[in-house]
Image (cartoon, helix red, strand yellow):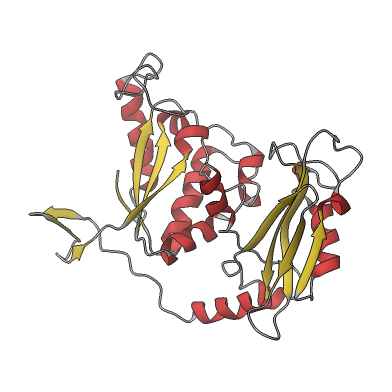
Amino acid sequence: ANRLRLALVVLAVFAHRHGEAALANATLAGLHCCSVSGENVLVMACEDDPDDSIAGISYAFSGNSSDGSAVCGREIDAVRGMNVQEAIRNKCVGLRRCPLKVKDFAAESCSNSTTQELRVRWTCFSDVRQQERAQKQLPHRLPDKPLRAQGSVIVDAFGERVRFTGVTWGGLHINNVLSGLDVAPASSIAKLIRRLGFNFVRLTFSAEAVLQNPVVEDRRVAANPQLLGRRALDVIDAGVAALEQEGLMVWLDNHMLESGWCCDGHDGNGFWFNERYTAEHWIQMWQIVTQRYGGRPNVVGV
């Protein structure tokens, strides 16, 4: 779990009002973040070239490291840490290196019995230049649908072979939200999946997430403010759209009936029905999914 969280943390990308014209095009560029606790020092750095420097701070918080939702100090979770963000911005933007101490961003309201954590994500001016170069490249091509089996291979609508090199993006089947959206924008997660060489993503979800379509917890989408107060299907929309922008195919996987961790012989998710969800509910779920996503060019199967 810790390795997964670390992997997701390094996906973060940002834009910031400082240098708005250039940074508006850098939302998929920077991949800089760090988290320290206790007496440790967090060192922000932008040193890709001699003229590089810190361009912006898009997210920061000070809080209890034992519980990501228990933020305190000068950062209030409901406003996504704007006070801490502003303090770090004033201190660090324009510098090549900027050391930060946790205690400088804590407050008396934080309990002395807990270990306080400082988490920051930033972008460098070199990221802006890299993004501008990337935008000049041709977009990744999606296969022409529908895909079908031809003997032992998969081909597109014109008979060209399609190879799946896939990875799973989970979370929706557990807590109704894609994993990692608390620490990274959906767009940066999709970008890294592409950069790692994958072209296919299995996106897992539960019947409960689709049929109940609950409002997601704000803390679980903290790095995606456009999803604050939104519902589970809105999160799927955002994930599918982000993957489409990177030319990544999506396979929608109904992994569970009820949202939660699996699997054992008693969790009630072994079939397409259980005591809470009938076969008719399951069919209704697929009708919602296919009507909503069947027309998306990158959704190739369920």
Residue at the top extreme, as displayed: 275
Instruction: Out of 10 and 129, give the one closest to the viewer.
Output: 10
Quarter the C terminus occupies: top left
Q: Residue at x 81, y 41 (%)?
A: 72
- Which x, y percent locates residue 190? 47, 59
Residue at the left extreme, as displayed: 151
Q: Is residue 152 above or below residue 218?
A: below
- Which x, y percent locates residue 125? 68, 77
* Image label count: 0
Q: Residue at x 81, y 52 (%)?
A: 102
- Which x, y percent locates residue 234? 52, 44
Residue at the bottom extreme, as displayed: 50
Q: Left of 173 or right of it: where is 302?
A: left
Q: Left of 275 or right of it: where is 213?
A: right
Instruction: Out of 108 and 277, give the one closest to the viewer.
Output: 108
Res 245 → quadrant: bottom left
Res 2 → quadrant: top right
- Which x, y percent locates residue 13? 61, 63
Residue 222 visible within the image: yes
Q: Left of 284 or right of it: where is 91?
A: right
